[in-house]
Amino acid sequence: MRAGSTFAFEEIYRRYFQVLFSYGKRITGDEEIVNDAIQDLFVNIWRTRTSLNQAQSVKFYLFRSLRREIHKSSKPGNLHGEDWETVSEEFLPTQLSPEATFAINEEVLIKTEQLNNWLSLLPPRQNEALVLRFYHNLDYPQIASILSIKEQTARNLVQKALLILKKLAIYVAFAVFQFQL
Amino acid sequence: MKYKDFNTSEFVEDPDFRKWVQKPDEMSNLFWNGFLQSHPHKFREISNAKNLLLEIEKQVRSDFSTRSNEDLVFQRIQQEIAVGRKQPVYLLRSWPVWAAAASIIFVIGFWFMNRGEVSPLLSYEGNIRQAEIPLSEKVNDTNKPILVTLQDGSSVFLKPKSKISYSSSFNSGNKREVYLSGEAFFEVTKNPARPFYVYANELVTKVLGTSFNVQAFENDKNVTVKVSTGRVSVALASDIEKTEGSDQLGGVVLLANQQAVLSRLDVKLVKSLIEDPGLIGPDHKPVDGRFVFGATPAAEVFQVLENAYGIDIEFDNTSFANCQFTANLTEESLYEKLDIICKSIEATYKVYDSQIVINGKGCN
């Protein structure tokens, strides 16, 4: 990459485009804004490629930059979970919203298609932290830097999410178990 | 065993556990299935942890975009890098305007030709304007060839200062169509049901699955198609309408190591051998992959070359009946081989179109 080869450039693009798109779409919902942000991000990488610090994880760099690009170009109201950005973490809910509690009553959950959505019952920031931690395998200092929060706050986000999911699991376990067999 | 007291959160936090769920392999399957057998009371935690990871993965994947969007954004990036500024996106979104412009240009072009005037030289810009479907474009403004992989698996080595366009929904429909300006080497995946067309200036090349090179710079005098493997047909774009519907394209059929050169001014299409013919494939090499001859009859030597390069070699069997040849010609090119062989059997060779003809008095 640092040699400036177009092959490596396209390779990085191809390897990360879909996960970046997926991540961006969760943040804004507007696919054109995501496309645009990814475009700016990669043009920027191309122009500054010689100064890219190689020791730093490429994936971490991409996610952090994409999030910044999207925030730069979005009106605050368009961002999912934007209202959480300014709220101090201790005030964030660890409880499910009333709608969510309704959605997971046992009867509904037996239908397996309902299981597809239980992650989206989480507050957006918790969902985002879970994805960064458990799908993209980033570590807590990296997640904290991406979300512009303290490392301990990033840990709390993930723990709270797991706590909610644990409560859910009591309802879900039976259905999941059946689904798996 | 550190895992025996793990709860669900600790499992999902464990990199090895995540690796097993995300990318299971033989080793990790062996380990974790073994662990479950010896610690059956951990089934619930493991099952919950695994389901959580799989749900997260499912969510991420459900937000993936289409391949054509991925290509489109990459193309915009390349354009911005090349042009140095961002192209307004609304241009790409407003299809109806483009479609109207295209049809007007098409009508004007048609009118010109019908008036029987000298039809203007066809160019890339004109060709892509006539395409009825949205196209993606790749431009190589580097000084090295770049590899473009098409949706059907075919690859295009796009040479410097060259560009190609192809349908955003390339892999559907009954034709695969590519528009080229400049030079490119194609390796086309076999699909007889959906022939592959290259439109390069005035020349159309049709293939079913093969590799070949097309050189068609806008301001060059010639358009050249060189074939490495397989079989392609090449025709003038203006002749295509006449053969529409029939399976053959008209024009000339090229085999491996042959080329067609179109002289654009006098519109003459000539078939010949390429400058430096190569071996046409592993199936056609001599048995041991080498060209080693020991007192081999000349007829047999020519036969070996004919097979290896897929080129017709004509010679008079009776006059060379007594000629034998001994040498190792593995490293030499085809023409070097012919030079050496002919010198030793006191013969000469000439290239006619796509044929090589050997002449000589024979040996005693």
Image (tube, coloured by chain):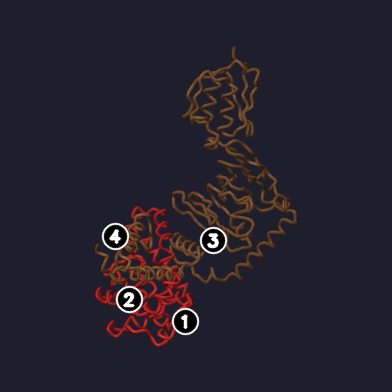
Chain colours: A red, B brown
Q: Position of residue B84 (x, y in %)?
A: 43, 62
Q: Which of B125 and B183 lies nearest the eye of the viewer?
A: B183
Q: Which chain's residue wears label 1?
A: A
Q: Position of residue A163 (x, y in %)?
A: 32, 78
Position of residue A32 relative to residue B172, above or below, is below
Quadrant (top left/top right/bottom left/bottom right) for the N terminus of chain B? bottom left
Chain letter behind tag 2: A
Q: Which mark is residue A53?
A: 4
Q: Quote the CA–CA distance across marks 2 and 3.
A: 44 Å
- Most distant residue in the bottom direction: A98
Q: Which mark is residue A162?
A: 2
The amino acid marked with disc number 4 is: Asn
Label 4 SS: loop
Q: Are marks 4 and 1 on the same chain?
A: yes
Assess disc 3: are there few (<14), some (14-19) or many (≥20) residues with their C-alpha within 10 Å of its C-alpha. Answer: some
Dot 4 and dot 3 residues touching (CB under 8 Å): no
Q: Which mark is residue A108?
A: 1
Q: Are marks 2 and 3 in contact (CB under 8 Å)?
A: no
Specify which label sits upstream in the sequence, 4 or 1. 4
